[in-house]
Amino acid sequence: VLVQYMEKDMFMRLSGQDGMQVWETTQQPEHTVYFAALGHQVEFPLGSTTSPEECMRMFVALPGRDKVRVLQLAGSAGTGAFQGVPREGKCTEFAKLDDEVRRQALAAWLAECSQSGVEA
């Protein structure tokens, strides 16, 4: 088996805009959420057809403080108890929410990040 590897910057320089479209459309949703949380601009694959499992994976990939914010946007009653530290039960709380509420909360978080100057 032969595995080839190329740095992203080199790939972009050689492939241009077409390469960026390939990169954006082939990355996993978890990576997209990670990049969004870091403030990098990447197309966020969240639409009306996003499955409940994809929403859960996206939520799990977020940093603690962003998980708390998504729960607040979802109107979750237990958000006051969360501080954004590991093992508080944020994922369990998110899993209790209705599928559409989860999707809408993630979409609202993304919109909020875009408006506040953090490119997602």
Image (cartoon, rainbow, N blue to C red):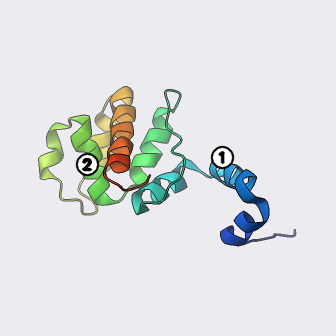
Residue at the image position 73 percent from the left and 71 percent from the top: 10
Badge 1 marks a residue whose secondary structure is helix
Disc 2 + disc 1, Cβ < 8 Å: no
Residue at the image position 53 percent from the left and 52 percent from the top: 42
Residue 17 against residue 7 in the figure, above or below: above
Badge 2 marks a residue whose secondary structure is helix
Q: CA distance from mark 2 to mark 1?
A: 27 Å
Could you say which is closer to the camera, residue 47 or residue 43?
A: 43
Q: Position of residue 81 (x, y in %)?
A: 13, 51
Q: Mark 1 or mark 2, which is nearer the start of the sequence?
A: 1
Say whether residue 16 is left or right of residue 42: right
Q: Quadrant of residue 6?
A: bottom right
Res. 53 mark? none
Which residue is situated farthest in the left direction here?
Answer: 80
Q: Position of residue 28 (x, y in %)?
A: 59, 51
Residue annotated with mark 2 = 69
Residue annotated with mark 1 = 25
Question: Which amino acid does the dot numbered 2 rest on?
Answer: Arg
Which residue is situated farthest in the right direction here?
Answer: 1
Say whether residue 112 is left or right of residue 52: left
